[in-house]
Image (cartoon, rainbow, N blue to C red):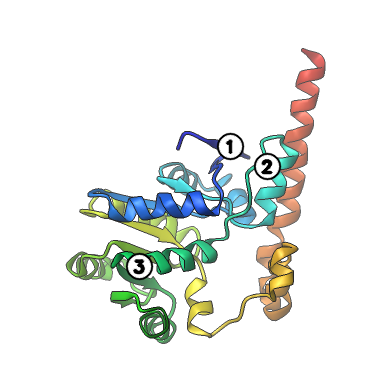
Amino acid sequence: MDKSVEILGVRIDAVDAREALDIAVRLAQADRPSYIVTPNAEIVVASRSHSDLKHALACAELAVGDGVGVLWASRVLRRPLPEKVNGIDLMLALLKEARARSLRVYLLGASSEVVTLAARRIRAEMGVDVVGFHHGYFSDSEDVDVFRSICAAEPDIIFVGMGSPRQELWMYRHVQILRRGVMMGVGGSFDVISGAKTRAPLKMQQLGLEWLYRLIKEPSRIRRIAALPKFVALVLLSRLREVLEVSTS
């Protein structure tokens, strides 16, 4: 990407939703393999103590800022992103393009029940050619067979919903041996598409409060939300250093 910003050491491409979609479609149609990541505040914080995750994020063809936290950070650091590009919104937009362009889709991740239902709904309600799917709870010893089944299906787009950092690490390892197609990390999006979970009301989405909605619905997420105060503190500290450097130069 020609345009990008750095948030606490993680590259975020400075694209809006339309530009991100255009790039994703081009990658899906290209005769080479690639992958897309969607770093949010939690992933950015995790990458600071997980060098393999940080490397996997850096090697992605496209990295979009998922969530209001990353957008806020870009503005505080005086490197503003055009807008937040939520992973699930990019996925849904890409599915529409997949139908319009006859692109083949594979789903990898979630439980067997959830991914089966998600595939069924994408086929029936969106008219997309889902050429295969597999749950995300496979062992390392089963990885080769799972990957072979994906390659045999010859998808143009592989949505990988195994949570971070597993999905980013999996895409990084396999992009080197995939013949073609674009992979995209989509976290828990299969749960939403299948109907197992619901998204926040549109107003809360617009206000950047999806994280609060998910916390209310799933109090167990409090451990993950705990990364947010650390993210805010790190961003403010980074900005303070920049200000002090300018004032003393």
Q: Residues within 10 Å of mark 2 (few under 14, many from 20)?
A: many
The foreground one among 223 and 185 is: 185
Residue at mark 2 to residue at mark 1: CA–CA distance: 8 Å
Q: Secondary structure at mark 3?
A: helix
Horizontal arrangement in the rendering, residue 66 relative to residue 165 (left or right)? right
Mark 1 residue element: strand
Which amino acid is tagged 1?
Val
Given the current orientation, which residue lies at the most extreme top position?
A: 249
Q: Amino acid at mark 2?
A: Ser
Q: Earlier in the sequence, mark 2 or mark 1?
A: 1
Question: Which residue matches tag 1?
Answer: 5
- Image quadrant containing the N terminus: top left
**Residue 96 image offset from top left, x and y in percent:** 42, 69
Q: Which residue is mark 2?
A: 74
- Report which residue position mark 3 lands on: 100
Q: Amino acid at mark 3?
A: Ala
Tag 3 or tag 2, which sits nearer the N-term?
A: 2
Marks 1/3: CA–CA distance? 32 Å
Whether tag 2 and tag 3 are in contact, CB under 8 A, the answer is: no
Q: Quadrant of residue 102?
A: bottom left
Residue 222 placement, left or right of 109: right
Residue at 75% from the left image edge and 48% from the top image edge:
232
Residue at the spot 57% in from the left edge and 56% down from the top edge: 85
Asked if labels 1 and 2 touch by Cβ distance under 8 angstroms, the answer is yes
**Percent from the top left, x then y, of residue 105?**
32, 69
Q: Is residue 172 in sight in this rendering?
A: no
Measuring 56% from the left and 49% from the top, which residue is drawn there? 16
Q: Describe the element under mark 2 as helix, strand or loop.
A: helix
Image: 1 above or below 157: above
